[in-house]
Amino acid sequence: MQASIEMSLYPLKESYKEIIKKFLEDIRKSNENLLIETNPMSTQIFGDYDEIMDLLRREIKPVLEKNKAVFVVKFLGTNLKEENKK
């Protein structure tokens, strides 16, 4: 199944920019099969649902173990990038 997610990370500390930058670097290195796009408000990930979930499971936990932070994630059960190509 294909999926699209939109995610925002809100670290609850003054040095929030470094935490966000590291998280984005880590998810980009983590899976080359997924399309990852960022903008000033959120990050979108497009691709296989299972691969997205594996990525989130791997990469969110270390952030939460080291920092007090909030993740807001929205899921859509289709790949919007693939749909727009049709």
Image (cartoon, helix red, strand yellow):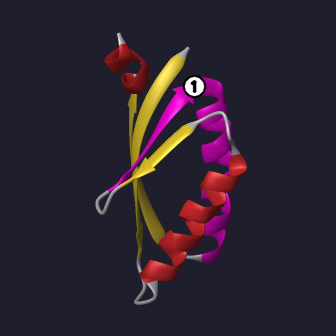
For label 1, the SS is helix
Q: In this view, does 35 lie above or below 1?
A: below
Q: Residue furthest bottom?
A: 14
Query: At 61% from the left edge and 53% from the top edge, which residue is drawn?
Result: 28
Q: Is residue 16 above or below residue 4?
A: below
Q: Which residue lies furthest to the front in this view?
A: 85
Q: Which residue lies furthest to the left in this view?
A: 41
Query: At 64% from the left edge and 26% from the top edge, which residue is drawn?
Result: 50
- Characterize the local packing of mark 1: few (<14), some (14-19) or many (20 or more) Cα atoms within 10 angstroms: many
* Magenta-drawn stretch contains 36: no
Q: Is residue 73 visible?
A: yes
Q: Based on the displayed image, in which of its 4 quarters is residue 14 positioned?
A: bottom left
Q: In this view, does 7 lie above or below 20?
A: above
Position in image of residue 15 (x %, y %): 46, 88
Q: Where are the magenta residues, as a range?
A: 42-66
Q: Is residue 77 visible?
A: no
Depth check: give the residue in front, 3 or 69. Answer: 3
Query: At 65% from the left edge and 43% from the top edge, which residue is drawn?
Result: 55
Q: Which residue lies furthest to the top in this view?
A: 86
Q: Is residue 72 above or below residue 20?
A: above
Residue at the disc numbered 1: 49
* Amino acid at the residue labelled 1: Tyr
Depth check: give the residue in front, 64 or 37. Answer: 37
Position in image of residue 74 (x %, y %): 36, 38
Q: What kind of secondary structure does the magenta stretch mostly adopt?
A: helix
Q: Based on the displayed image, in which of its 4 quarters is residue 34 positioned?
A: top right
